[in-house]
Amino acid sequence: MTTDIKHVFFDLDHTLWDFDKNSGLTFDKIFKRNNIDVNLNAFLEVYEPINLRYWKLYREEQISKSNLRYGRLKDAFDAVGIEVKDELINHLSIAYIEHLTTFNHLFEGTLEILNYLKDKYVLHIITNGFEEAQERKMKNSNIRDYFKTVTNSDMVGVKKPNPKIFNFALDLAKALPTESIMIGDSLEADIEGADQIGMDTIYFDYKDLNNSKGYKKITELKSIKNYL
């Protein structure tokens, strides 16, 4: 058990909020509304790694928000061999953001673990997601009130794993690195990023695909109880 921790920081997407499931439901909705004839499973199979690659570029300040939103769709349609005009891709990119937060599936055990932690620790969010979307996700899935502070990359001007966003979040929370722990699904952005400023970490590898490189690792949220 980690005994000195007072503050628990969570990532949001792919950690508490089930991004892949909600994203798939969103694509199904907007494709039907816009008469896009594509096999949804085939599209999602190529889209998910493309999306992760674009987010990595976005984290590294190599592309803009608009480049991310357009490029991930364009590349995914190209990968499944469907020609879609730029005007429609731009329309779909907007519709995707608008409808994404109408689906609010959380990872199994999210509410259980938040209820377990809330009376023992002060809870916070650090996310690279877009501010307007992240707030809607948390409010619509009824988890916003669990968190004292929410830090997103729009507020700070940099993204995880940049130490500035972690230091900003700690200042906002009035927390020290040595009394804080970061829980997230990205080894690079969440775990290595938090570790480099002295925070404790728990790596949530929900697909159980990666070596945790010596970091504490869980594959189910309920396993947080083994450490906190």
Image (cartoon, rainbow, N blue to C red):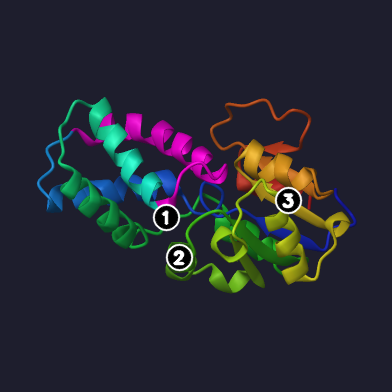
The one nearer the camera, 88 or 80, is: 88
Q: Is residue 221 left or right of 2 when viewed as pictured?
A: left
The residue positioned 44% from the left and 67% from the top of the image is 132
* Mark 3 vs mark 1, CA separation in Å: 30 Å
User: Which kind of residue does numbered mark 3 sit on?
Assistant: Pro
In the figure, residue 164 lies in which quadrant?
bottom right
Identify the disc placed on residue 105. 1
The one nearer the camera, 115 or 216, is: 216
* Mark 1 vs mark 2, CA separation in Å: 7 Å
Callout 1–callout 2 Cβ contact below 8 Å? yes
Q: Position of residue 69 (x, y in %)?
A: 35, 48
The residue that disc 2 covers is: 141
The residue that disc 3 covers is: 163
* Mark 3 vs mark 2, CA separation in Å: 29 Å
In the figure, residue 46 lies in which quadrant?
top left
Sequence-first disc among 1 and 2 = 1
